[in-house]
Image (spheres, rainbow, N blue to C red):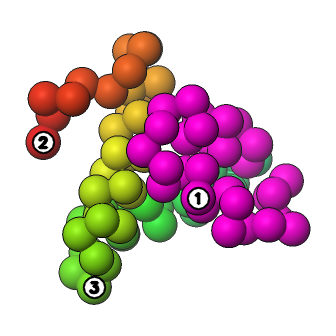
Amino acid sequence: MTEAQDPEHLWSRLLSGEPDRIRGAWKSLGAAEQERVRRHLQTMAEEPGWQPGQRKAARAALDCLQADRDGQAEPDPKRP
């Protein structure tokens, strides 16, 4: 992880809710790291034990990353 020296900074960007910060943090990761982070974000968004704000931030990050994969400029704000 290129930001391994400061994982708090990486996660603050990933969970910021700001698409540009999410994308920048994502692009700083290697492919294997991206897969681990994606799985962790899914866990945060879908499994019990996380605070509502954490779940919302993780879902926003996943939506942003999915929108990028789908070729959309921004995630669809109407998506639940």
Q: Is residue 74 or residue 40 the one in the foreground? A: 74
| Nearer mark to the viewer, of 2 and 1 | 1
Give left or right: position of 41 versus 12.
left
Q: Earlier in the sequence, mark 2 or mark 3?
A: 3
For disc 3, the marked residue is 49
Q: The magenta stretch spans which residues? A: 1-29
Q: Specify which label sits upstream in the sequence, 2 or 1.
A: 1
**Which element is circle 2 on?**
loop
Query: In percent of the image, x 35 and y 45: which residue is there?
Result: 60
Give the farthest residue toward the bottom: 49
- Residue 10 in magenta stretch: yes
Tell me how far mark 2 sits from mark 1, CA to CA: 22 Å
Residue 65 appears in the picture as rendered: no
What residue does disc 2 label? 80
> Residue type at mark 3?
Gly
Circle 1: element type: helix
Placement of 61 over or under 72, stated as above or below: below
Q: Amino acid at mark 1?
A: Ser
Name the image quarter holding residue 55: bottom left
Residue at 38% x, 21% y: name it.
74
